[in-house]
């Protein structure tokens, strides 16, 4: 049985890293990330696991027994000014399970799950499963002008070798990830943890609105082709039109020339769409295209819409879910993206979601009880013992 004290002790070694007044900023490929990696190595050494880093920068704590192994873990990077549980709780659980299991268990910390520095979410697990667009991501730069390739090299990971990462999937028999619930769904059931049925369908739209730059004071309203004003109208109309099954979020905006006295000539907007299945997203995109044409006609601003990324959703392995639900844990659909969703395409995978009474995540205010987390971690341990060498 895994205890609350066990998980609290493990996480205590991480909490000072990237911590400013309780807010955690631990971006990938930074000194804070390296300090978290040192914590990972210490935890592995304490229970006799050897650490290797794969070509994508994922950290693996592996037993001496020959693989493939059951793998338990998550990630150690954070969003900017995030919380202390999102990711690390799953890695700490991995070490707790590995220490107590009769099976040879590997613990993983996936690289750059949050994508907080280069907008590269689930970077490490996408590289592992061979779906990462390597050429696209390596040239991306952060706010200092440092490219991802340069940042990886500075962290001791050769970006030229990322293409070799998929070979490491051969080490994996199956994967289980414990994570803080990022909604109140589990809390509403009154249980300490739930089991994810899968990940919701998701689509990210990239919209470019092109108008004319002009003087903010001298240009009459009728003469304007204001890209920023058109974006506001587009977003407002889309939010009015979205159905109850869809969660729509305007997530990022870039404005040119972004000057106080100049009408915006170009705006790039990203919109995140999620739903239980792809069907309502498909229907809404048709309506969104109609709204975009109306905005073009009414403002003279050109509106181009592209699908930047798309996922039809993921169903987690039924056998693993049944084993994890042996104590009648509720099943819930997860609307967030996770490494387990990437691994599920190639190996049996599952997720345990720990009760979060507030539903808050990606914030210093995120909170779970270690007792609840220990119950979820123990469920993973017991499920793997039942599965045995399968």
Image (cartoon, rainbow, N blue to C red):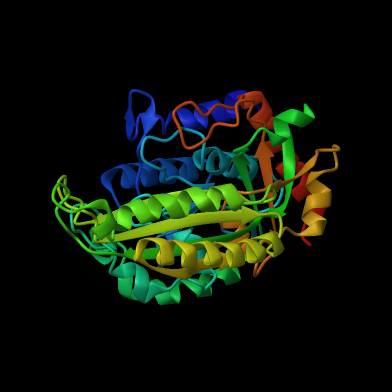
- Which quarter of the rendering shows the N terminus? top right
Residue 60 appears in the rendering: no
- For this rendering, which residue is in front, 306 or 68? 306
Describe residue 268's horizontal placement relative to residue 308 as left or right: left
- Residue in the image at 69% along x and 50% along y: 245
Q: Residue 348 location, x and y as percent? A: 71, 62
- Which quarter of the rendering shows the C terminus? bottom right
Q: How many marks?
A: 0
Tell me which corner region of the image, top left, top right, bottom left or bottom right, holds residue 95: top right
Describe residue 210's horizontal placement relative to residue 128 as left or right: left
**In the depicted structure, whether residue 207 falls above or below residue 102:** below
- Residue in the image at 60% along x and 52% along y: 241
Tell me which corner region of the image, top left, top right, bottom left or bottom right, holds residue 55: bottom left
Q: Residue 371 location, x and y as percent? A: 66, 24
Describe residue 192's horizontal placement relative to residue 9 as left or right: right
- For this rendering, which residue is in front, 101 or 80? 80
**In the depicted structure, whether residue 285 falls above or below residue 221:** below
- For this rendering, which residue is in front, 178 or 277? 277
Describe residue 71's horizontal placement relative to residue 19 as left or right: right
Residue 316 appears in the rendering: yes
- For this rendering, which residue is in front, 250 or 111? 250
- Residue in the image at 59% along x and 44% along y: 94
**In the depicted structure, whether residue 326 falls above or below residue 212:** above
Q: Residue 56 location, x and y as percent? A: 41, 65
């Amino acid at each position: 049985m895994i205890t609350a004290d066990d998980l609290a002790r493990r996480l205590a070694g991480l909490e000072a890293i990237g911590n400013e007044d309780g807010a955690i900023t631990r971006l990938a490929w930074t000194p804070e990330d390296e300090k978290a990696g040192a914590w990972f190595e210490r935890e592995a050494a304490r229970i006799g696991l050897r650490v290797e880093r794969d070509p994508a920068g994922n950290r693996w704590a592996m037993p001496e027994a020959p693989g493939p192994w059951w793998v338990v873990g998550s990630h150690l990077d954070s969003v900017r000014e995030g919380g202390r549980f999102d990711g690390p709780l799953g890695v700490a659980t991995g070490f707790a399970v590995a220490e107590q299991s009769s099976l040879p268990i590997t613990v993983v910390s996936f690289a750059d799950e949050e994508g907080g520095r280069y907008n590269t979410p689930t970077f490490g697990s996408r590289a592992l499963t061979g779906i990462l667009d390597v050429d696209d991501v390596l040239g991306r730069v952060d706010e200092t002008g440092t490219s991802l390739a340069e940042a990886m090299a500075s962290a001791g990971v050769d970006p030229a070798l990322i293409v070799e990462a998929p070979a490491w999937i051969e080490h994996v028999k199956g994967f289980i990830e414990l994570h803080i619930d990022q909604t109140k769904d589990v809390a509403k059931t009154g249980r300490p943890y739930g089991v994810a049925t899968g990940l919701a369908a998701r689509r990210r739209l990239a919209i470019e609105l092109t108008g004319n730059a002009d003087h903010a004071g001298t240009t009459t309203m009728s003469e304007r082709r204001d890209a920023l004003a058109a974006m506001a109208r587009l977003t407002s109309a889309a939010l009015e039109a979205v159905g109850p099954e869809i969660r729509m979020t305007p997530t990022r905006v870039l404005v040119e020339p972004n000057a106080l006295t100049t009408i915006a000539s170009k705006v790039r907007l990203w919109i995140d769409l999620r739903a239980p299945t792809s069907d309502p997203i498909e229907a809404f995109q048709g309506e969104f295209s109609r709204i975009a044409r109306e905005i073009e006609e009414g403002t003279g601003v050109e509106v181009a819409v592209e699908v930047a990324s798309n996922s039809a959703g993921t169903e987690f392995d039924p056998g693993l879910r049944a084993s994890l639900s042996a104590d009648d844990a509720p099943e819930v659909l997860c609307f967030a993206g996770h490494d387990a969703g990437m691994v599920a395409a190639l190996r049996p995978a599952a997720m345990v979601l720990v009760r979060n009474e507030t539903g808050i995540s990606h914030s210093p205010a995120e909170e779970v009880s270690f007792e609840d987390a220990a119950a979820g971690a123990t469920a993973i341990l017991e499920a793997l013992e039942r599965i045995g060498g399968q």
